[in-house]
Amino acid sequence: MAVKNTTRVLIVDDSALTRKILREILSSDADIEVVGTAMDPYVARTKIKQLNPDVLTLDVEMPKMNGINFLKNLMRLRPMPVVMVSSLTQKGADVALEALGLGAVDYVGKPDVTSAASLTDYSEEIISKIKMAASIKHAPVPPTSMLKAGHSPSEKAISNISLKKNSAHAIVVIGASTGGTEAIREILASLQPDSYSLIVVQHIPSAFSTAFAERINKASALDVCEARDNQKILPGHAYIAPGDQHLKITRDKSDDSYRCKLDDGEPVNRHKPSVDVLFKSVCISAGSNAVGILLTGMGSDGAIGLKEIHDTGAITIAQDEQSSVVWGMPGEAVKLQAADFILPLDKIAGKVTTLMKKDSN
């Protein structure tokens, strides 16, 4: 009888209560084995050598050495999938975003023991993220110019694709989830202010979205902000969806401009904000005067929306498998034949720039 493979997890947290709760949650899943716990990075270092875990959960604030410094050393000496456990506060947001930049796969908040319902939701979240992290292979990435055969249309065959522009300025919409904070930062840092606007939905907690927008703004020549309701969308600006509301784009016919519309509706595809909600609104408001981009992420949010953008005659881009942390969302879009271009992350900003230059000629 074949032995069932399980995901081996080491929990690193200075709180005995948190270690106990995380152990109970993760051990409740038959596919996960908690092989040990550690109260600080020095104990963790020894146990990683002894136990060889598949995934690490890592607290941010710990005695002797904080989680960020430990993560830096870990990624240099023994790279492995890490899920950060961070308080959902401004300070926690700053540290978690820094950790993602250092190579952490994802993050979760601290478990809330005051509510059975929230603990149930939390259990589902951390279990799914641990399993996702275990599927990631921290191996050298192949050259990003090499796409898998059959995955991408040839550049030559679709070199004549261009925006079917109407009177309003063009809109670039971006959706992402797991791995997306760094992917979005890389793209926006590579763009210069131009005659188009960017609208971004990243699956992120509400406590993190302001810090995320501020972090991107510091890295980019664009003017980047967290979107506000009824905010006018200006060329050369980028707007990040708040972490607890859907973001839609509406058209103001009085001056032929676009505006941000925040929506406090129910989650879509289990997410709020949802990429599909943004993409579908762009179909209505901008039509073919748009570029839709779907980046790394777990699940399928945004795949149907990208297909709808594609079917309006707009241009669509999906991140390729090799450069994605998780090829869930863009992979689903490719299955739907929703992407005109399937590109490695470091080629996407250049493609946007080329498309916009072509459109302005």
Image (cartoon, helix red, strand yellow):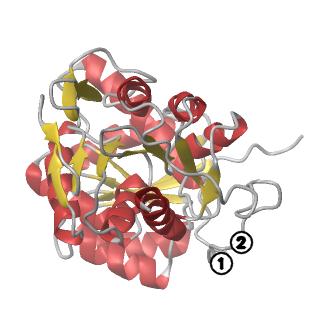
Horizontally, residue 234 falls left or right of residue 139, namely left
In which image quadrant can residue 262 be found?
A: top left
Between the residue at mark 1 and the residue at mark 2, the CA separation in whole angstroms equals 6 Å
The one nearer the camera, 204 or 126, is: 204
Q: Which element type, helix, strand or loop, lies under badge 2?
A: loop
Q: Does residue 113 appear in the picture of this structure?
A: no
Q: How far across and down, in percent of the image, does residue 93 sit?
A: 18, 53
Residue flagged by tag 2: what amino acid is it?
Met
Q: Position of residue 238 (x, y in %)?
A: 24, 52
Q: Which quadrant of the view contains residue 1? A: top right
Q: Residue at left 50%, top 53%? A: 9
Whether residue 158 can be seen here = yes
Q: Amino acid at mark 1?
A: Pro
Q: Are marks 1 and 2 in contact (CB under 8 Å)?
A: yes
Q: Is residue 93 left or right of residue 192?
A: left
> Seen from this angle, which residue lies furthest right?
1
Image location (x, y in percent) of residue 265: 26, 15
Q: Quadrant of the C terminus?
A: bottom left
The quadrant in which residue 168 appears is top left
Callout 2 environment at 10 Å: few (<14), some (14 to 19), or many (20+)? few
- For the point 76% across and 54% down, the residue is 151
Q: Position of residue 39 (x, y in %)?
A: 28, 62
- Residue 143 tag number: 1
Identify the disc placed on residue 146: 2
- 10 Å crowding of disc 1: few (<14), some (14-19), many (20+): few
**Callout 1 secondary element:** loop
